Amino acid sequence: MQVFITGGSGYIGRSTIKALIRRGIEVTALARSERSARTVSDLGATPVAGALTDTDVLREAARQADGVIHLGVDYAEGTADVDRVAAEALQDGAASHPYVHTGGVWVYGTTDGVVDETAPLSPPRITSWRLENEKRVLARAATGERPVVVMPGLVYGHSGGLVQSFFAEPGRAAGAVPCIGDGSNHWALVHVDDLAELYVLALNAPAGSAYAGVSDQNVPLADITRALSQAVGCPGSIESLTLEEAVRRMGPVAEAFALDQQFTGARARRELGWTPTRLDALTELARG
C-alpha cells in the first residue's frame, strides 16, 4: 500500500509518517522546500515537490496513491480557500480510495460537560472556516468516494505543538507560564503519537465518518500550566492573563485556548479499534 500525505514534515505529520512506515506502508509526502524534503526523506518517505496551491501536483500524487492523508495547512492569507481547493484536488485524485481530512474539535466551542462528535457546533473565529470545508469533503461520500475527517484535540508530546509554542516557550523566556483566566477551563488532549495511530486507522474507516482525536484526558488549563512551569524551570510561576490580554499577546488563537472543552474519543475506539496508550499528559508535560 502507498499513502500520500500533506504536512508530512510538520509536528503531527512526522509522527504519522513513522506510524505508516511501521506498518510497512510506503509513503510519499508533499514537500514545499528542500528542508521539508530532507525531513520526510530522513523519516523514510519519498518527497513530492510542491505546495498546497499546486493542485496539479496534489491531484497526480493522490491518483498514484492507495490513500491520502491531508494534514497540511497554509496559514497565509486565504487559508480557507487554499484548504478547500487543495482538498478538492486531493479528492479528485484519490477518487474511490480513502481520503482522510484534518479538522479539529475547536469547531464545537465550549462544551456542556463531556461530549462526542454529535455535539452542537460553535467555532471560535480562528477555526470557523473549517465548517464549510469539512461539509464539502464529507458530502463526496454520496458519490462513492471515501472521505473521513479526523478532528484532533490539543496535541502534545515530544516537546512540540501549540502547547510548547504558546505556553512553554514564552514561560521559559519570561520566567512565568501564561494562563488564560483562572485556568478552570478544560483542554481535550491527545498525544501526537496516539493521534498518528488514529490517522492510520482512519484509512479504513467508513466513508463519511468523523472522529474526535482525543484520548479522554480532559485536563484543566491551570494543571497544564503548572506542569509546564516545572518543565521550563520556574515551578509554580504562573502569569494570569485576561482573555483580552491573551488575544493581544497570542492573537485570535487565544480564544480557542480559552474554550472549556471535554471530549470523548469513544467513537474511534469503538469503530476503529483505536487504543490511545499515552494517558498521563501532566507527567509528560512536566518533564518537558
Image (cartoon, rainbow, N blue to C red):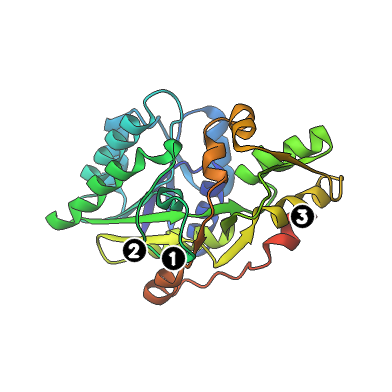
Q: Earlier in the sequence, mark 2 or mark 3?
A: 2
**Can you tell which mark lies on residue 208?**
none
x 47%, y 41%: residue: 7
Q: Could you say where residue 186 lies in the image, as x and y percent from the top left? A: 59, 57
Task: Kindly identify the amino acid type of the residue bearing the numbered disc 1.
Answer: Val
x 35%, y 56%: residue: 120
**Residue 153 visible in the picture:** yes
Q: Could you say where residue 244 lies in the image, as x and y percent from the top left? A: 60, 32
Which quadrant of the rendered structure holds the N terminus? bottom left
Q: Which residue is mark 2?
A: 118
Q: Could you say where residue 196 lies in the image, as x and y percent from the top left? A: 51, 58
Q: Nearer the viewer, residue 188 or 181?
A: 181
Q: Which residue is mark 3?
A: 227
CB under 8 Å between discs 2 and 1:
yes
Q: Could you say where residue 176 lies in the image, as x and y percent from the top left? A: 81, 40
Secondary structure beneath label 1: strand
- Which is in the foreground here, disc 1 or disc 3? 1
Rounded to the nearest angstrom, the CA distance separating label 2 from label 3 is 32 Å
Task: Kindly identify the amino acid type of the residue bearing the numbered disc 3.
Answer: Ala
Q: Earlier in the sequence, mark 1 or mark 3?
A: 1
**Residue 30 visible in the picture:** no
Rounded to the nearest angstrom, the CA distance separating label 1 from label 3 is 25 Å
Rounded to the nearest angstrom, the CA distance separating label 2 from label 1 is 8 Å
Secondary structure beneath label 3: helix
Residue sitting farthest toward the left: 143
In the image, is 105 to the left or to the right of 179? left
Q: Where 60 sits versus 194, above or below?
A: above
Task: Kindly identify the amino acid type of the residue bearing the numbered disc 2.
Answer: Thr
Q: Which residue is mark 1?
A: 115
Q: Residues within 10 Å of mark 1 (few under 14, many from 20)?
A: some
x 51%, y 47%: residue: 13
CB under 8 Å between discs 1 and 3:
no
